Amino acid sequence: MSAPDNRPIRPQYRHRPADRVVRREVLESETVSLRPPRQTRRSINPALALILGFATLIIIGTLILMLPFASTQEGSVGFTAALFTATSAVCVTGLVVLDTATAWTGFGQGVILILIQLGGFGFMTSATLLLLFLLGHRASLQQRLLLGQTMGGGMPGQVIRIIKRIAILTIVLETIGAAVLLPRMLQEMQFGEALWWSVFHSVSAFNNAGFDLVGNFSSLIPYHQDFWIISVIGILAVLGAVGYTVIADTVGTRGVWRRMSVDTRLVLSASGAFLLIGFVFILITEVPNPATLGARDWSTRILDAVFYSMTPRTSGFTAIPMDQVNDETSFFTMALMFIGGGSGSTAGGIKIQTFMLLFFAILAAARNREQVVAFGREMPITLVFRALTVALLSIALLFTSALALAFFEEFSFLEVLFEATSAYGTVGLSLGITPELGEISRIIITITMFVGRLGPLALVLALAGFATPHATRYAQESVKIG
């Protein structure tokens, strides 16, 4: 049978239950274009990001301060002076080679104030986030996961919330400080100048910058009898030096000591001890000195001694002529400047927590204990190692800077060591030699301020980043100690 067109008629196939059907596919060539593999972005090291950020801010500030209309002198102040001032402002140090009140115009002073605010807020925010989440200082599990967000990913809402809280705390405290200072300054100057003076010193005090508009490199010495100004600036400096986490924990626990974290108790107890020790020490050493406290009445001596106990670790303001103090006071001041304030605060130094960890490690060794215990909590031995590393490297860098200054300056070694310690601790106190430093010495101090501001934090972050557990244990052997 065939179809009308002579094609054979294929029999209709009917599928049966036991039949297996095999289909043959016709393969055709097809061109497929593949996208190149997507390269994953490497997250930048937080320590490196912090260093680059501050370096960029310093460079921008230097270029702006070099503009002719930023200074009162004809032409530019020059690269070295602008770089020194910008670094001191961003690192909230307070050392100056040009008098802030007379050498800079209103525009230049405004730039310095902005650099102080950005430097203090930026460091406090970065240090708080990185230390809180990386090292787990009283942080919940959810907050500890925020380390990923600081490097790009995860739940950014928590980070934004903490940044907002730090910003609100900063603005509120600086506003209150300026508002309290304003009525006092209206007694001496017009409203516009009084407002600018109050805002500038409030921001400088809370950020522990030490810049002032008093003039003639005199800091607050002309106001050494003024309880109003001395107390407000001292309180702002102390609040800035303890840091956001300590303030938040103290407020959150309503001041109940046993409910506070060990970190908060370390900062508060050490700060109180340093305030008391500094107060007693300055009275003992400087009351017999007629060039400082000896010529003042006892009410002023008490006020200035309390103010002194607040400032060497933090702000760099002073009501005592530091170039007239005894050598004992200078050496003790260097110890306070080296220790500094709390971690994650606007203060510098190796930080209170670092010092206190080493202090409790010494107590543990004296008691022949292997565990370092603070306020009933055992401290991880890795933190003790990091604290020891930060302290020893800081001492090495400090003395390297002092020796470098001694090669280029004819001042006494105590004076250059004091200058280097003030720069490394980002304090701003000086024995009066800062304006007289040569070009090379200014560069040395500039580098010291930058390293002192970011070095300890960057070192801690780097050490924490390399903290990988090792399963290998080696045989123990003792060595001679002492």
Image (cartoon, grey):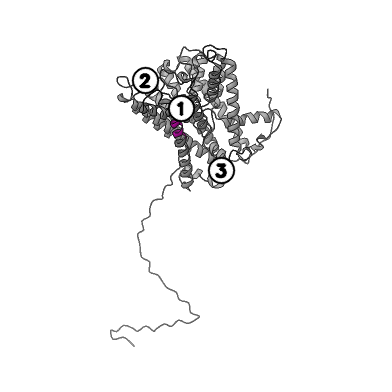
- Under mark 1, the amino acid is Ala
Q: Nearer the viewer, residue 373 or 312?
A: 312
- Under mark 3, the amino acid is Ala
Is residue 333 positioned above or below 163 on the image?
above
The residue carrying mark 2 is 102
Q: Position of residue 471 (x, y in %)?
A: 63, 41
Q: Is residue 74 left or right of residue 477?
A: left
SS for dot 1 = loop
Frontmost of labels 3 and 2 is 2
Frontmost of labels 2 and 1 is 2
Badge 2: how crowded within 10 Å, few (<14), some, or many (20+)? some
The residue carrying mark 3 is 139
The quadrant of the rendering that contains the C terminus is top right
Question: Is residue 174 magenta-colored?
Answer: yes
- Under mark 2, the amino acid is Thr
The residue carrying mark 1 is 209
Badge 1: how crowded within 10 Å, few (<14), some, or many (20+)? many
SS for dot 2 = helix
Q: Position of residue 360 (x, y in %)?
A: 64, 31
What segment carries the magenta color? 173-180
Q: Position of residue 108 (x, y in %)?
A: 35, 26
Residue 388 in view (yes/no): no
Q: Nearer the viewer, residue 18 or 150?
A: 150
Q: Position of residue 453 (x, y in %)?
A: 48, 29
**Mark nearer the N terminus (3 vs 1):** 3
Q: Who's the residue at 33% across and 23% down the image?
A: 71
Q: Main secondary structure of the magenta part?
A: helix
